[in-house]
Amino acid sequence: MRKGLASDVFSYFSDNKIYQYDIERALVKFCKKDILFVKHCYCDLSDKEIEIFVDWFLFYYKLKDNKQKPLKFYYLTKYLSFNEEDKENYKNLLKSVYSLWKICKIDLDKGMDLENMYNKKHIYVKEKIGTHDIDIGDIIVNRVSKIDDHYELLGNTNWYWLKTEYDHPVLRELLKYKKANPKLVRDLMEQFFETIEKLKNGGREKINKKLINGDECICEMCHKQGKIGGLQFDLITNEPLLYCKNCASKFVNYNN
Ligand SMILES: [Zn+2]
């Protein structure tokens, strides 16, 4: 597969005046800011955020006029102009899968066997450098695509968890969904770091005052006393809100 396939498609939309509204609308959603901010902030996204935005836009955003996802729309409307190789390349890209992958087997400098944590399916990816800094059981977040006769990880690995971090709050939260997408992962990560900041800024003392017997609380949802299973901060007052394990396992702490 030739390089830059996805960024070619993104340029088609971002350079085309007809889609300016869609690009801005997508940025408003992605940055969670209003349009005036978006018109000035685009260049402020870091390289990593741009990579996440482009992936999310191509695979998950729905164009205003036809409700199609940009990559699929591009593929369908440009299909006749593709050469045979690109027909195959774009088809593979469309079928690529963004997910959390558990490393099940490592062949140094050759590749890795990955398990999709959402459907338990295995896939063998060709990989060289990435086989060195990783351990069996670690979890990576990435898009996997067929390239010619094999599979590869696309883009840079933005996040990963070591096998010692299986109880990481973001990982636990992500696994409550049917599948992951780059914006969801970014948003949950952001929420997590915001929470850490709030804990540092006096939040922990407020939580301590609400604790009963060290690890129990009066749950904000069911109002019963139970072991702590979840924590949120009130968006307006910044008060910590504690939830019992039972309620925390039911709510999904994210609004797309
Ligand atoms: Zn509860």
Image: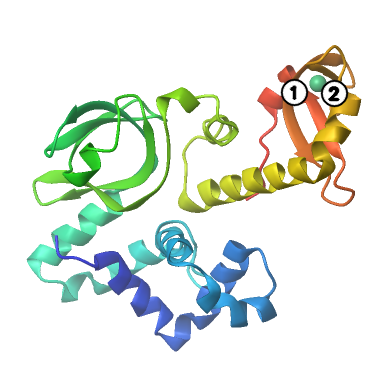
Q: Residue at x 40, y 29 (%)?
A: 117
* Secondary structure beneath label 1: helix
Name the residue carrying label 2: 219
Left or right: 228, with 178 as reference point: right
Q: In the figure, residue 249 lies in which quadrant?
A: top right
85 up-or-down from 96: above or below? below
Ligand 1 in which quarter: top right
Residue 81 locus on image (x, y percent): 17, 76
58 up-or-down from 190: above or below? below
Name the residue carrying label 1: 247
Q: How many marks?
A: 2
* Secondary structure beneath label 2: loop
Q: Residue furthest bottom?
A: 17
Residue 46 locus on image (x, y percent): 48, 67
Q: In the figure, residue 229 lies in which quadrant?
A: top right
Residue 89 locus on image (x, y percent): 17, 59
Using the image as rendered, state which of residue 63 and residue 137 is in the foreground: 137
Residue 173 locus on image (x, y percent): 58, 33
In the image, is the residue at mark 1 within 8 Å of ligand 1 by its beta carbon?
yes
Whether tag 1 and tag 2 are in contact, CB under 8 A, the answer is yes
203 up-or-down from 45: above or below? above
Q: CA distance from mark 1 to mark 2?
A: 8 Å
Left or right: 223, with 68 as reference point: right
Tag 1: amino acid: Cys
Left or right: 224, with 109 as reference point: right
Using the image as rendered, state which of residue 50 and residue 253 is in the foreground: 50
In the image, is the residue at mark 2 within 8 Å of ligand 1 by its beta carbon?
yes
Nearer the camera: disc 1 or disc 2: 2
Tag 2: amino acid: Cys
Q: In the figure, residue 213 lies in which quadrant?
A: top right
